[in-house]
Image (cartoon, helix red, strand yellow):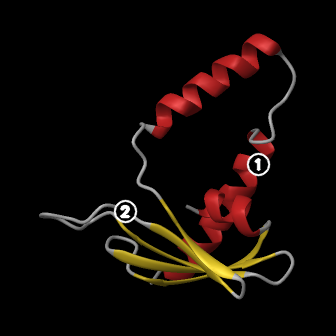
Amino acid sequence: MIDLLDAALGRVTGVRAHGDPLGWTGLLLEHEGGAVSEASLCQAAVGDLPPATIAVYGRTGSAVLPAFDEDPLETVAAEFAQTVRNGGGHPLDAAHGLRLQRIIAEAEAQLAP
């Protein structure tokens, strides 16, 4: 989710986390350019759950992303294989992953007791 918001609204420059890391967690993300986003995450819900939704609201309008029909890991694997075959780099490389991991670690530290 952080990666998606980073791509859509600009590089994440700050995070504030609240909630329970084993239940519901909220992330307030600050982006380059001044945008702010809020992500609500829960991996512990059970029962008949509604589909995950992603909505963006701004001064000039809003958008709701359709539900994902594909398994995102299949797309990741296919793009990785294509990058290896073609050589060269990819914008979502190890440095990008490390930057996201630092954001996650900062959020986790804020949630620690």
Asked which quadrant contains residue 33, the reply is bottom right
Q: Alpha-carbon neighbours of circle 1 within 10 Å: few (<14), some, or many (≥20)?
A: few
The residue depicted at 74 percent of the width and 11 percent of the height is: 85
Q: Which residue is mark 2?
A: 52
Which amino acid type is marked by label 1?
A: His
Judged from this view, the residue extending furthest toward the top is 85
Front residue of 7 and 16: 7
Asked which quadrant contains residue 109, the reply is bottom right
| Number of marks in the rendered image | 2
Above or below residue 90? Residue 88 is: above
Mark 1 lies on a secondary structure that is: helix
Question: Is 101 placed left or right of 95 in the picture?
Answer: left
In this rendering, which labeled residue sits more in front, label 1 or label 2?
Answer: 2
User: Residue 52 in the image: x percent, y percent?
Assistant: 37, 62
User: Residue 28 in the image: x percent, y percent?
Assistant: 60, 82
Q: Alpha-carbon neighbours of circle 2 within 10 Å: few (<14), some, or many (≥20)?
A: few
Q: Quadrant of the C terminus?
A: bottom left
The residue depicted at 12 percent of the width and 64 percent of the height is: 47
Which amino acid type is marked by label 2?
A: Ala
The residue depicted at 87 percent of the width and 22 percent of the height is: 88
Q: Which residue is mark 1?
A: 96
Asked which quadrant contains residue 93, the reply is top right
Question: Is 73 placed left or right of 63 in the picture?
Answer: left
Judged from this view, the residue extending furthest toward the front is 61
